[in-house]
Image (tube, rainbow, N blue to C red):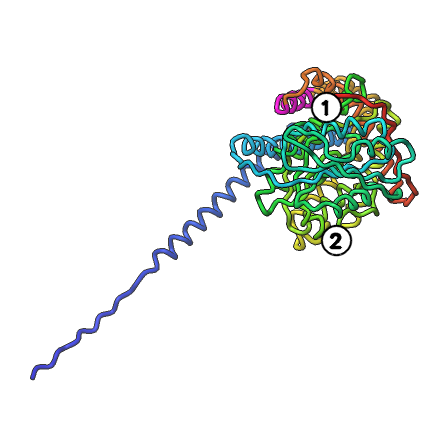
Amino acid sequence: MSQNKIRSTRITVKNTEATEAEDNKKRHILRRMVTNGLASLFLILVIITTMPMTVLSYSALFEYATMISLLLFLLVLLMRYFGLLGMAYLWLNNYTFTKRPDFQPFVSIIVPVYNEGILLKDAIMSLLELDYSNYEIIVVNDGSSDNTYDVAKTLVGYQQGQHGKVKVSLISKPNGGKARALNAGISYSKSEIVLCMDGDSQLSTDTLKKGARHFIDPRIGAVAGNVKVLNRGKFYADLQALEYIEGLNMARAAQSFLKLVNIIPGPIGLFRKKAIEEVGYYSSDTFAEDADLTLKILSKGWKIYYEPNSIAWTEAPVKLQQLLKQRYRWTRGILQAIRKHKNLLYNPTINFGDTFILWTMFYEALIWPTMNIVANFFFIIVSIFYGYTSLIFFWWVFLALLDAVTALYCVAVEDEELRLVPYSIVYRMFFVFAIDICKMMSTIEEFLGLEMTWGKLERIGTGK
């Protein structure tokens, strides 16, 4: 039997991958050293060349800092504008080309009224013209001292609507504020969907049809409507009409892209009753119960959508003093709502969407107005003392052009009046500036804890 001989062989394996990786690393380091060296050499040459022409002084440093500040301010402004425009466009594209089923659940319309005798009948008549067949109207008289109760009583019963009889009910209660009045109407309602509005608002005929259909999605807890100014034709009213289109509705459209609308407006908001019950109804401890309820609904994981064709026409202040009083209350109410949910400001793990919305509200209510006021005063003073008047003029022209283009886009999207676009020329430098000063003063008073009252706009009664 032969024996098999096994030959011993020595094999050396070279790790070529490791060697190549090491060579690449060395070449990368060498390339970085050469690049940095050339860049440093270039900068040194620039410094040596320009040093004789450089005048080092506090004045020059201040001028340079001013230019950088102006650039940074414009950069923040552009990021804010184009961020909103971009998301609003994406939302509009989705809204336009997405088909939605014709979902028409039974809806209860809650109308809280306090001393709205002048406008109440027009408001209820507009509700009877809604192109919707499955709804009721619940009027809640919140202890009015005028003829509101008498006007409301004449409307109780089954009234003729577009598609048949519509039940109109009346709840009369002692005065307790809008939040408690809405809660009374919601509790009385037996429907799954409720529409909350102001007593002076008038709804478009498509409001329910367009708004209620979104509730076919079980994730939707509320739908924010589109508020428009009714009493146009006066300077401040027209400026607010443009503000609602450009400053509010564009923001809601951008937020709706994320289904995280931060404030459901008081004049028009549709809610899933289950969502309202889950968060404990409206609260009366802020002057912005709409913002507070919206934040509570978002904190529970519900989504909120914006419906541009659910339109509420509302009367806007026509005098500067009335306008500033309104914005004073809005600002303090929003700050109160933010304070109630401040734990979400610091801890995004609870609800990241709510944290994001709270920070945007905080920015718009506090940070941006302060930045705008300081920047305007700073650049005006610098232009006077350093001869930059021409630069400030071009800066104003740039902002006015930006506002005009944005206004034109928003007016086209909403098929609004083209005559509102020229108001954009004075919109930022006058209107927004005055509102921002009011916001800053409101913020100071809120942090000082000064007492405030609700206040009420004097109605003149204007038909649409």
**Quadrant holding the C terminus:** top right
In this view of the protein, can residue 198 be seen by the observer?
Answer: yes
Q: Secondary structure at mark 1?
A: helix
Q: Report the magenta stretch's main SS.
A: helix
Let me know if residue 158 is in the magenta part: no
Mark 2 residue type: Asn
Please name the residue shown 64% across and 37% down the image. Answer: 134
Mark 1 residue type: Leu
Apparent side of residue 366 relative to residue 7 in the rendered image (left or right): right
Quadrant location of residue 333?
top right
Q: Which mark is residue 343?
A: 2
Where in the figure is residue 183, as x and y percent of width and height?
A: 78, 46
Please name the residue shown 54% across and 34% down the image. Answer: 94
Q: Which residues are magenta?
A: 401-414
Are the residues flagged by discs 1 and 2 in contact, CB closer than 8 Å?
Answer: no
Report crowding for label 2: few under 14, some 14 to 19, many 20 or more residues within 10 A (C-alpha). few
Q: Earlier in the sequence, mark 1 or mark 2?
A: 1
Quadrant location of residue 13?
bottom left
Let me know if residue 409 is in the magenta part: yes
Q: Depth check: 66 or 135 in front?
A: 135
Outermost residue on the left side: it is: 1
**Quadrant holding the N terminus:** bottom left
